[in-house]
Amino acid sequence: MTASRKLLILGGMALAAAGMLYGLYYAVFVEHQTLDQMGGSLTRAFASAAERDSSGSQTALQAYASTKYDYVRQVDAHSHWIGLGMLMILLGALFGRVNFSEAVRQAIAISLLAGSAVFPLAVILQTYHHGAFVFKALAVVGPVLVIAGLTATASGFARQPTVAKEAR
Amino acid sequence: MATVAKSSLAVSTFAPVSARRLYIFGGIALIAVGMLFGDIFAVFILHQNAGQQGAALIDASRAVASRDAAAATAIFGRLGGLLEDRGTKVDAHVHMLDAGYLALLLALVQPYIALSQATKKAMAGLFVMAGVLLAIGIFLIHYVGLAYSPFVVIGWASVLADSSGALLILILMVQAWGFWKYLQNRELAEPELPAEDSMASRALLTGGTLLVLLGFLHGAYYAGSMLYQHEQMEPAVLQRMLGFASEGNLAAATGEVTNFGNLAGERAVNIAAHSHVIEFGLLAMLLSFVQPYVYLSDKWKRCWVKVLLGGSVILPVFVLLELKLGLLAGGIADVGGLMVVTGLIGMLVGIVRYSGHLDAAESAR
């Protein structure tokens, strides 16, 4: 098995397991409490407005928006890690059909795996520092790496078999 | 004449009740049932649930206008129930599909898992069982609630779902350990899946890769141009809704409820289109591997591939168009989903026929 395939299969399994472990931890220890906070904040916003307490209503709405910002990102990171992990395992199994030299395939595999690991991580880190530029930038770099790797993979599938066959 | 994978390689990679056969049957069945459930949910529950949420928000605005904080609080209890109803059904659908995709992936990597056949078979059986129980557990969360639960916020259905999730993680870790063992001696535990260079396989592989790429591009576009804007709009809309309700202007507050619904709809269709096109791409790529086991004529194999790929494009495109065309687009998207399920079941029938053919030949010896 070539190094590029090994990297994608092992890396994909690690990403999928990390995503599942994170999801399990989140579901057991955080999700129910977060959903309660979100519902509670929205309820308080309406109840305070009914009591004509506009500052209380405003504060509750801000708490709702902030909790939802975190919740959406936590769930997204979990699902993207697992989804990208599965894609990496699948591409690892298929990588013998990418008709480039092994050095190019390794570069593509590194780009795919780095993007798949960094993107959900940057999304989670945004929950600790809302709006931090560096995490937003990382959340852009990750998908760019994956899209570039996937485009190269697709062109490798379409390419006539020349150099890659010996190293499947 | 059926194009059967008659080679000894194809036969040896699909032994009766082997781990690979369990993963392939279980995986395709989980995906087909998950998609069918998703289609039923979309037709009979999704839009009705959204309508009920809107009605609850209008009631809450009325409660604010009449200074009735207790009524507003009670309405949000009802709204929480509606959100849980919707959320658990979406999650059951998604988790069943993902367990199916993982099962097909594991079928693919079995040659690189250096474990005994008995262990592999036990893991495959447990995996399919955990995939089913995970979805059932999530589905039941809304109905079981906290009945007879010793925990403060976690009910028995959640316990079932979380335990099944933990079992899936454990099985994945065992597979990773088997792969690690393979890397030590580099001997294949069983033959690799036979590579078939048919039109059906190539179309699934190329089409699948393009679908995944399209999904990534759409996701990147949505995240870059709309996600943050939508996140800022939601509290602003709620703020205006509460402001109008406090002033007693119920017509304007109801207008903001409509804006809130439209915003939620816009986010939902973009996320649904993004996730569905990528999942269908993954599915197509995975199915390209099992084509040697589809015991059907070339004509029928090509037909199911076209139906599956056609549905994979129709569903996400018309989900996106729902905002402009309304329920008509929603209906067409549902037909797209049914096309994917039909293509999948067509291939599953071919694989069942192949198994029967193989087992009959085996028992005749």
Image: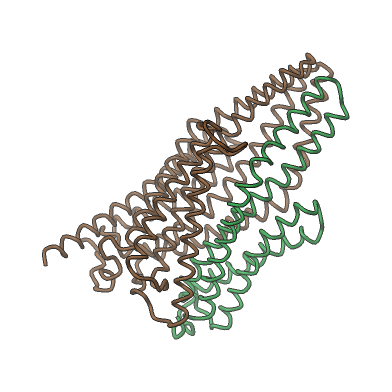
Chain colours: A green, B brown
Name the quadrant containing residue B24: bottom left
Please tell me whether residue B187 is drawn above or below residue A90 in the rendered image: below
- Left or right: residue A84 versus residue B24 is right
Q: Quadrant of the N terminus of chain B?
A: bottom left
Please tell me whether residue B45 is drawn above or below residue A110 in the rendered image: above
Residue at far front of view: B150
Residue at far left of view: B364
- Left or right: residue B29 versus residue B266 is left
Residue at far right of view: A55
Please tell me whether residue B90 is drawn above or below residue B12 in the rendered image: above
Q: Quadrant of the C terminus of chain B?
A: bottom left
Name the quadrant containing residue A139: bottom right
Q: Foreground residue, A85 or B149? A: B149
Q: How many marks?
A: 0
Q: Foreground residue, B311 or B244? A: B244
User: Residue at 54% across / 83% down in the picture?
Assistant: A101
Q: Position of residue B52 (x, y in %)?
A: 60, 25
User: Residue at 68% across / 21% down in the picture?
Assistant: B74
User: Residue at 69% across / 41% down in the picture?
Assistant: A34
Q: Foreground residue, B33 or B161? A: B161
Q: Foreground residue, A133 or B319? A: A133
User: Residue at 32% across / 53% down in the picture?
Assistant: B348
Q: Position of residue A129 (x, y in %)?
A: 80, 54
Q: Position of residue B235 (x, y in %)?
A: 78, 36
- Left or right: residue B32 versus residue A112 is left
Q: Position of residue A157 (x, y in %)?
A: 49, 72
Please tell me whether residue B140 is drawn above or below residue B75 in the rendered image: below
